[in-house]
Image (cartoon, rainbow, N blue to C red):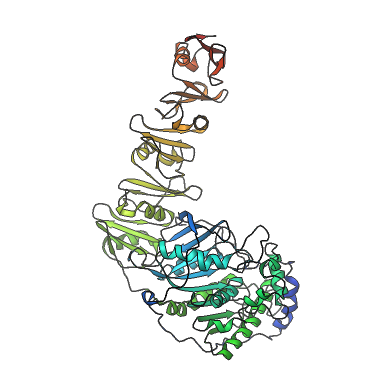
């Protein structure tokens, strides 16, 4: 598996497929008519949407999305094309994770801006990652598309709306976040235009439609894949309420009030349909019967995904009602009623591929990537690294070499370093460092697996980047890299890097964290590692800012399995029986030296020094040393 996000493969539906849930009774009531074919309608479409190019971004009237004070508190480059932002939402009062898949030409055309596509999740949206990246091929699918893909993370049962009240520990104000707080960040920092599309499945499909209607001009395209497209019809508020309670224990009354509340009407795609004029619309749903991605139950037409059957039937019925309303209003839409299929991810992945040409047309990008090929040194590197996939761009210049982008990474070439593949989280860390124009320079090796099988690495002209699923990707360079290499790289005492190298505030030195300790580099004292219990003691005493100062040695072994580090102001000694204790340079240390250090008659220290009447004392395994009136005495 390539460098990047590692995850367990699993199947789930947007609202779950477990039996015995609250929706089981609703699903069961709808299974019988499906089994006898009442909803097995052939694929049809309402008035198809004609292909058209949208107005160039530069000529558009700007959408009114003033900054509401949202700020980015953290950015993680998960790969060279996938970024996680933590956006401080003023309306919700918490950081919201938003992942971005960067456009195909992000690197090849560094001054260009790109349309965006909001990908909205289902009712059981998770807090760590979007279902679109967990359950579909969205990452490789969008790799050759010239749009920035926006993936809000979280929002279980939220319908991406502004709630009337807090519930279940959540202060949901998703509509404000998505349409007011997030856009200025995307436009200001992430080269994103005001041309947008929205694609949602299940809950997200409902949301895509009402967000487009409630925020006219915000989206050029809106797609509902198995969405519930009339939420106020007879029994639908109750069905939504059951589903939300089942998915996380949420109360629909906290969202839009009781079913008679005006807020339900204000979020019903059917009632808002007239406001969708001018939006390119795509609606799809299955029939609920067993399809190519379902496991048959043994009953004709009935799959084992019982809840998914009932939910898809609800989607089909409400989508038909919605499409009829659009036709009456003269609003064109592409409507796809599939002859089979349940409420589950494989069908939504299929629909994502089907809707792309219409989405591309609506946001003004080519549906297909330009022709490209490989040759020369980069062509040879492709042959040696076939996992890198298809080319996305032609070769183009960078620094004093060339680079070419591929589905799963990038290949950098220079006459003296050759052509080398950089990918995944290592590619993200390389981008953060400045790429070949940054301090690391060009890569000198391809993406390689580490000998212990835990991770991957690339070496560069001026450093290395190492990655594991547990530690992430971090660059190691300069004197710290040299010392780490001398100690055995990741196989040495410190293990893998867990942080980037940083300058120490107010000190002439740098520091970098590793799995089992920390490496310090200081011109006056050299480069040394501190680890284990000695590191813990060093931390208690204030690190390099305390009286010990910088380390002057790495860990040194002594008798009985003990170890010590020398520092500017003293030493820390540790052994399994005595623990870790610091000895300050001066009379106590000199007296201890006079009796043979830890190998002498009083052994290892078992305390730090402490005050006694007239002086100080420090205890050892077999005695103690006092300093009174400047005179040291060993007891």
Q: Which residue is located at x 42 percent, y 26 percent?
A: 567
| 80 or 62, nearer to the observer | 62
Residue 477 occupies which quadrant of the picture?
top left
Residue 116 in the image: above or below residue 544: below
Q: Position of residue 54 (x, y in %)?
A: 41, 80
Q: Position of residue 185 (x, y in %)?
A: 45, 62
Residue 152 in the image: above or below residue 577: below
| 475 or 12, nearer to the observer | 475
| 291 or 635, nearer to the observer | 635
Horizontal side of residue 165 vs 604, given as left or right: right
Horizontal side of residue 337 vs 83, given as left or right: right
Q: Which residue is located at x 39 percent, y 53 percent?
A: 432
Residue 408 in the image: above or below residue 62: above
Horizontal side of residue 237 vs 560, given as left or right: right
Q: Position of residue 389 (x, y in %)?
A: 40, 65
Q: Can residue 536 be seen in this view?
A: yes
Q: Which residue is located at x 33 percent, y 65 percent?
A: 111
Count of marks, rendered view: 0
Residue 219 in the image: above or below residue 484: below
Q: Can residue 337 be seen in this view?
A: no
Which of the image's four quarters has the C terminus? top right
Residue 463 occupies which quadrant of the picture?
top left
Q: Position of residue 384 (x, y in %)?
A: 35, 59
Q: Which residue is located at x 33 percent, y 74 percent?
A: 371
Residue 427 occupies which quadrant of the picture?
bottom left
| 170 or 594, nearer to the observer | 170
């Amino acid at each position: 598996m390539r460098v990047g996000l590692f995850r367990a493969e699993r199947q789930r539906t947007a609202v779950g497929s477990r039996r015995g849930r609250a929706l089981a009774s609703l699903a069961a009531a709808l299974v019988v008519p499906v089994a006898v074919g009442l909803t097995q309608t052939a694929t049809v479409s309402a008035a198809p949407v004609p292909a058209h190019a949208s107005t160039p971004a530069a000529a558009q009237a700007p959408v009114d999305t003033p900054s509401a004070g949202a700020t980015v508190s953290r950015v993680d480059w998960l790969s060279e094309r996938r970024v996680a932002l933590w956006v401080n939402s003023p309306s919700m009062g918490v950081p919201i994770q938003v992942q971005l898949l960067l456009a195909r030409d992000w690197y090849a055309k560094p001054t260009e801006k790109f349309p965006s596509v909001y990908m909205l999740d289902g009712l059981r949206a998770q807090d760590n990652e979007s279902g679109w990246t967990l359950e579909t091929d969205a990452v490789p699918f969008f790799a050759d598309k010239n749009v920035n893909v926006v993936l809000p993370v979280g929002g279980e049962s939220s319908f991406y709306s502004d709630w009337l009240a807090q519930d279940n520990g959540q202060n949901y104000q998703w509509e404000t976040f998505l349409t007011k707080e997030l856009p200025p960040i995307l436009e200001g920092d992430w080269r994103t235009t005001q041309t947008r599309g929205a694609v949602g499945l299940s809950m997200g499909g409902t949301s895509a439609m009402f967000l487009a209607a409630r925020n006219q001009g915000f989206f050029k395209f809106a797609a509902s894949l198995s969405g519930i497209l009339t939420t106020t019809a007879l029994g639908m508020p109750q069905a939504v309420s059951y589903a939300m309670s089942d998915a996380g224990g949420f109360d629909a009354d906290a969202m839009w009030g009781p079913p008679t509340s005006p807020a339900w009407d204000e979020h019903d795609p059917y009632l808002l349909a007239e406001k969708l004029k001018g939006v390119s619309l795509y609606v799809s749903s299955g029939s609920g019967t067993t399809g190519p991605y379902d496991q048959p139950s043994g009953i004709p037409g009935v799959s084992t995904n019982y809840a998914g059957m009932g939910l898809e039937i609800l989607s089909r019925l409400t989508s038909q009602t919605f499409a009829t309303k659009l036709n009456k209003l003269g609003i064109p839409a592409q409507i796809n009623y599939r002859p089979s299929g349940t409420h589950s991810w494989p069908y939504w992945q299929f629909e994502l591929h089907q809707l792309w040409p219409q989405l591309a047309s609506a946001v003004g990008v080519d549906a297909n990537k330009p022709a490209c090929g490989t040759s020369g040194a980069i062509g040879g590197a492709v042959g040696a690294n076939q996992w890198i996939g298809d080319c996305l761009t032609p070769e183009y210049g960078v620094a004093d070499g060339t680079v070419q982008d591929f589905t799963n990474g990038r290949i950098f070439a220079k006459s003296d370093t050759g052509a080398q593949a950089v990918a995944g989280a290592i590619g993200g860390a390389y981008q953060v460092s400045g790429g070949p124009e940054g301090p690391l320079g060009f890569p000198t090796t391809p993406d390689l697996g580490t000998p212990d099988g835990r991770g991957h690495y690339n070496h560069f002209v001026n450093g290395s980047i190492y990655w594991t699923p547990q530690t992430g990707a971090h660059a190691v360079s300069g004197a710290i890299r040299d010392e780490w290499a001398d100690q055995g790289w990741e196989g040495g005492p410190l293990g893998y890097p867990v942080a980037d190298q940083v300058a120490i505030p107010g000190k002439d030195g740098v520091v970098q964290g590793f799995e089992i300790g920390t490496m310090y580099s200081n011109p006056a004292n050299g480069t040394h590692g501190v680890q284990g219990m000695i590191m813990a003691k060093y931390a208690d005493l204030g690190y390099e800012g305390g009286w010990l100062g910088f380390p002057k040695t790495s860990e040194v072994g002594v008798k009985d399995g003990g170890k010590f580090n020398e520092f500017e102001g003293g030493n820390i000694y540790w052994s399994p029986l005595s623990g870790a204790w610091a000895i300050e340079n001066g009379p106590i240390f000199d007296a201890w030296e006079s009796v043979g250090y830890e190998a002498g008659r009083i052994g290892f220290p078992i305390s730090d020094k402490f005050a006694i009447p007239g002086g100080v004392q420090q205890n050892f395994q077999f005695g103690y040393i006092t300093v009174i009136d400047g005179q040291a005495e060993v007891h």
